[in-house]
Amino acid sequence: MIKKLKKIKVLIVDDSALVREILKKGLNEDPQFDVVGTAPDVYVARDKIVFLKPDVLSLDIEMPKMDGIDFLKRLMPQYPLPVVIVSAMAAPGARATLEALESGAVDFVLKPSVRLGSGLSEMMKEFKSKLRMASEVDVSKWKRQAKAQRYAGPKVLRGQGRNTGGSQALAGTTDKVIAIGASTGGTVALRKMINGFPANMPGTVVVQHMPPVFTRMFADGLSGTSAVEVKEAESGDRVLTGRVLIAPGDRHMEVVRSGGRYLVECRQGKKVNGHCPSVEVLFASMAEQVGSNAVGVMLTGMGRDGADGMLAMRQAGARTFAQDEASSVVFGMPRAAYETGGAERLVNIEDIDRVLIRTLEEIK
């Protein structure tokens, strides 16, 4: 007897009747999905969630009466549900989407255009993929979750200089480089990590799977809450103590050595492992250019981007870690890095800063 495939029940919340109809039609063409209902605002959505019990929620942010972010902040502690945001590309939408991810949303997709014409097919493909993934995410931790106190880290990392003069200061030159890869759930994990960095943390380079505009806003937001400088990377930027460089949303980023300095190069290119920027590209450059002076960290994310690159880093003498399953939104990328032998151990996100700092102090 053939086992019947369990359908994923979706509730679509959007104030645009056109968007609701387009998303509903697109999902209903796929036998794996069952659109159990739609809602024009969060008040209608609230009632339908209780009665229809969807597996996953598709949520617009900018809506009348109450926006999606306020709704998320009220929903998740009381009735945690996997949520995929359907976001506008413009700057206000990007800012709001990042806040939604911090408030409990699993992931997001971008509306392809004002009229939902160009790029609709690709958007629906991505939307379905992320709904499938979100439906399997355990969001129960949000229920009555108290705000965790973040680990502030030591005021100064022993044996490491401090960058007090910006990009022109030779004192800021780093001889160790930290490389971090992340995808789904990564914005929250990265914020927790980077907010715990001491001001003299070795230069850090990051690939987080996000589109343009989002990466710049994410970097700007982090720079305002952390002890280190955080910026969206540009070609020629130096990797300096006290600085975190985040790959721009449509560019691969590589670390290159120039004499005694490390720089980054950002370039357009074909997607690698389905992504641009790709963690694989960054980690491969770290293995080649930084070798045993590198430390690699793989955070939460779907797929296996960066797994082979992390293995190359470890084989080149780098220390390597991956986020554990219990604290990952999606354990795909950390699992792949660990199972291929790239990550030497799995670490809970609450402990990664401490492990990282202790490891850096051990590296001679």
Image (spheres, rainbow, N blue to C red):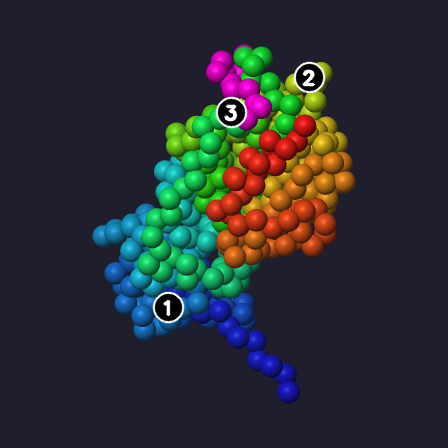
**Mark nearer the viewer, 2 or 3:** 3
Name the residue tied to disc 1. 37
Q: Amino acid at mark 3?
A: Asn
User: Badge 1: how crowded within 10 Å, few (<14), some, or many (20+)?
Assistant: some
Q: Residue at x 33, y 67 (%)?
A: 49
State whether the magenta stretch is mostly helix, strand or loop.
loop
Q: Residue 23 or 135: which is nearer the viewer?
A: 135
- State the residue in front, 26 or 220: 220
Q: Nearer the viewer, residue 131 or 198?
A: 198
Between disc 3 and disc 1, the foreground one is: 3
Mark 1 / mark 2, whichever is N-terminal? 1
Task: Answer whether residue 325 is visible to the viewer in this image.
Answer: yes
In the image, residue 172 lies at what x, y percent?
56, 18
Magenta extent: 158-168
| Amino acid under disc 2 | Gly
Q: Is residue 240 above or below residue 357?
A: above
Q: Earlier in the sequence, mark 3 or mark 1?
A: 1
Q: Measure the alpha-carbon separation of dots 2 and 3.
A: 19 Å
Q: Position of residue 285 (x, y in %)?
A: 70, 33
In the drawing, what numbered circle is on residue 342?
A: none
Q: Residue at x 57, y 30 (%)?
A: 204
Q: Which mark is residue 200?
A: 3
Give the alpha-carbon distance from disc 3 to disc 1, as whole Å: 51 Å
Q: Which quadrant of the rendered structure holds the C terminus?
A: top right
Dot 2: element: loop
Tell me the quarter of the picture where residue 259 sits: top right
Say which residue label 2 marks.
260
Rounded to the nearest angstrom, the CA distance separating label 1 from label 2 is 60 Å
In the rendering, at what x and y percent does residue 317 appear? 74, 36
What residue type is disc 1 on?
Gly
| Residue 144, magenta (yes or no) | no
Nearer-N-terminus badge (2/3):
3
